[in-house]
Image: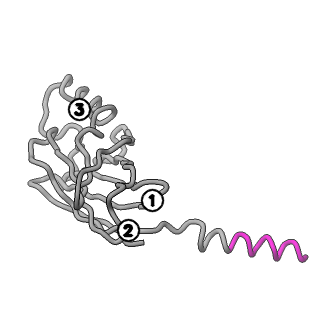
Amino acid sequence: MRSSGFLYLLIFLFLTTGCQKKNIESNEKTIGNIILNARLESADINNGIDFTYKISTKDSIYILEYGITEQQRYLDRIYYFSYQVENDFWLEYDGGEQKCIGAFFERNYRLTSDITLHLHFDYPEKISKDKEILLVYHAKEFGFPPVKMRFNLKT
């Protein structure tokens, strides 16, 4: 009887504290028909800065086919998001820039019309925890200049 109470306590603690994410902040921009949504998932000096970045359209067109008609261009876009997109993301802050060191593209095979990217950055050495950063995406694939989204690193 006593062990089941302890088990319920552990489950309660896990559900109320273990699943909480810190530093959650979202930012959204719309350019033409394209919606860019960035979500700061975590920012920790030891573990870096993580974002979830979603790209979609207002009218639910499959984003990987947006603005293209040729099959080869579609395959090139899949390759870009799978292997090259991290080169087009960086952080700007007082005193410098931090390049994206890892991007994971969630391939959804047309189950949804959007795409999701998970981005990871090293924590900039020259920035304090209470500073603002800009997440920048140079969306060459969609033909528009760099898009900047502001986030606060307060913990």
Which element type, helix, strand or loop, lies under badge 1? loop
What amino acid type is highlighted by mark number 1? Ile
Q: Nearer the viewer, residue 78 or 146?
A: 146
Give me the C-alpha separation between circle 1 and circle 3: 33 Å
2 or 1: tag closer to the N-terminus: 1
Residue labelled with disc 3: 77
Quadrant of the rendered image containing residue 25? bottom left
Q: Residues within 10 Å of mark 1 (few under 14, many from 20)?
A: few
* Total number of numbered discs in the rendering: 3
In the drawing, does residue 16 fall left or right of residue 148?
right
3 or 2: tag closer to the N-terminus: 3
Which residue appears at 76% of the width and 73% of the height? 8
Give me the C-alpha separation between circle 2 and circle 1: 8 Å
Residue labelled with disc 2: 129
Q: Which mark is residue 45?
A: 1
Give the magenta range.
1-12
Which residue appears at 22% of the width and 29% of the height? 74
Which element type, helix, strand or loop, lies under badge 2? loop
